Amino acid sequence: MDISNTLDQKNGIKIVAFLCNWCSYGGADAAGTARLKQPPQVRIIRIPCSGWINPLYPLKAFNEGADGVLISGCHPGDCHYAEGNYYARRRLEVLGHFLPFMGIDPQRFRYSWISATEAQEWQALITEFTEKIRELGPIKKHVEVS
Amino acid sequence: MKEVESRLKEEVKKILDEVAYVVGYQEGLTPLSARPLFIRNPKEVDRLVYNDFCAPNLANYVKKSDQKIGIDQKVGLIVKGCDCRSVVQLLQEGILKRENLILIGVPCRGMISFKKIEKLFDPLETYLAEVRDKKLKVHLAQGEESYHLEDVVFEKCLWCETREPLVVDIMIQGPLSLELEQKEKDFDIVELEQKEPAELFDFWTAQFEKCIRCYACRNACPLCYCQDNCLADTRQPHWLGQQTDALNNFMYHMIRAMHVVGRCTGCQECERVCPVDIPISKIFRKTSMITQQLFDYIPGMKVEDVPPLLTFKKDEKF
C-alpha cells in the first residue's frame, strides 16, 4: 500500500485508520450517513476483525510516512468472532509501549473500541485524534536511499 | 573448568550410543573462541572443549532436528543456563520434542565476549588464554598480558539469573560464578528510555544505517525459525525493499521484534553475531521488559507456559 502519494498535501498530515468491518467501520459509515463532519485526512482501511491486525501493519504505515495510526474494533466481549479483540488488545498494548522506544511518539498511535451504533463517539474520537496529530505535525521519516 | 570438560567428555561418551549426534563446542579459530561441534563417534569426543569462551547458543543447531534425522532418533545437546531457556521456549512451541532430546547441563560462570576482546588486542595472535584470579590471562607474541574480567565478559552475564540450566537430563556440577560485581538487569535500556522519542529516532536511524541486512541476527536466533516463510524475504506482499537504507532496515528489525516479542529469552545471539555492532538485543530486551511488566511473564522458564500474546484474559485492564 502506498500512502506517500497523498490526496491532500495541503492539510499536511495523513492518518491511517484500521477499522473492524463489524463495528467501527459501521460506526464510521453511520457517521457518514448521518452527515456528521469528519476530518478528511483520515484514510480508512476496512479489516475483518481487530484480531486480524498484525502489529506490523501500524509499523509499516509509520514507516511509509503515516503521521498517525488509529485502530478500532468491537468492544471487548462483543467480537463478531468471539475473541479476536481480546488478542488484539494485548498486541496493541505491547505495541503502544514499544513505539516510543523506537522513536515514534506514542501519541501518534491509538486503539479504541467503537460499536456500529456509536457514530457520535467515532466522530468525537477521530476529530480529537486528528487535532492531536495536527499539533504534533508531520512524522520524521527515515531517509530512503535509492 | 578443565575438570568440567573432562567430566563432560565422559558423559558424552556414555550417551553416544543412544543419540544420532551430540552438539557441543570445539575450539574456534583462536583459543579465545569456540564453534559448534557435532559428535557422531567416540573419536570426535576428543575435540570437545568447554571453557570460558563457549558463547554460541547451541539450541539453534537442534531446532528442526526431528525432521532431519527422523522421529525415532535422539539428539544430545550441551546447554548452558541461558541456552536452556531457548530450548524450553522451543519445547513450549512444539519445535523440539522433549523425548528426542538428551540435555547435558553445564555450569556457566559467565562467558567472554570475542567482540570485547577484539577491541583490546588481536585474538589471532593469541596462542593461549585462561581465566585465573579474576583476570583473563593471554599469551601473546610479545608476552603475557592480563585483563580485567569486567571488561571482557558479556554484559548479559553480569546480570544473569539462570546460571544453572532449568531443564536437564544430566547436570555437570562446577563453578557458577566469576565473583564479579553484578549489574542491574537491562540498566542500559532504562537509560535509553529516558530520552525523548525524537532523540531515540536519531539513535536508531544511526544504528540502522550501519545495518547491511546480512540476516545473521535472524539466522543466529534460535526462535526465528520461519525459514522459507520469513517476511523479510517476501516480495509479495512487499514488506520491505532490498535497499539497505534506514527506512527498509527499520522495517526489517521491526519484523523481527514483532515476531519475537513475548518469546525472546535474551540469549543475545543476535548482538553477538552482528558484524556491524548494532545493539540489536536492546530492541528484544525492551519487548521482554514490556511483556514482563504487562503480563508478568518471563519467556523460557517453564515448558507448560503459554506465550502471553497467544492467550488473553477477558477482564484485563491496561
Image: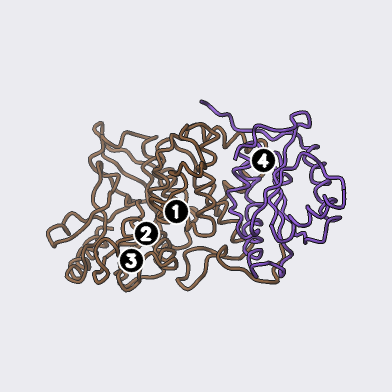
Q: Mark 4 — on which chain does it sit?
A: B
Residues beneath discs 4 and 2 located on the same chain? yes
At x 80%, y 48%, the residue is A126
Q: Label 3 marks which chain's residue? A: B
Marks 3, 4 in one chain: yes
B311 vs B144: above or below:
below
- Look at discs 2 and 3 and give the one toward the viewer: 3
| Circle 1 residue | B157
Q: What color scheme is it?
A: by chain
How far, Cα to Cα, is label 1 from label 4? 26 Å
Q: Are marks 3 and 4 in contact (CB under 8 Å)?
A: no
Q: Which residue is mark 3?
A: B105
On the picture, is B23 further left or further right than A25?
left
Q: Residues within 10 Å of mark 4 (few under 14, many from 20)?
A: some
Chain whose colour in the figure is brown: B
Looking at the rendered structure, the secondary structure element under dot 3 is: strand
The residue to which callout 4 is attached is: B195
In-front residue for pair B86/B31: B86
Against B212, residue A118 (above or below) is below
Number of numbered markers: 4
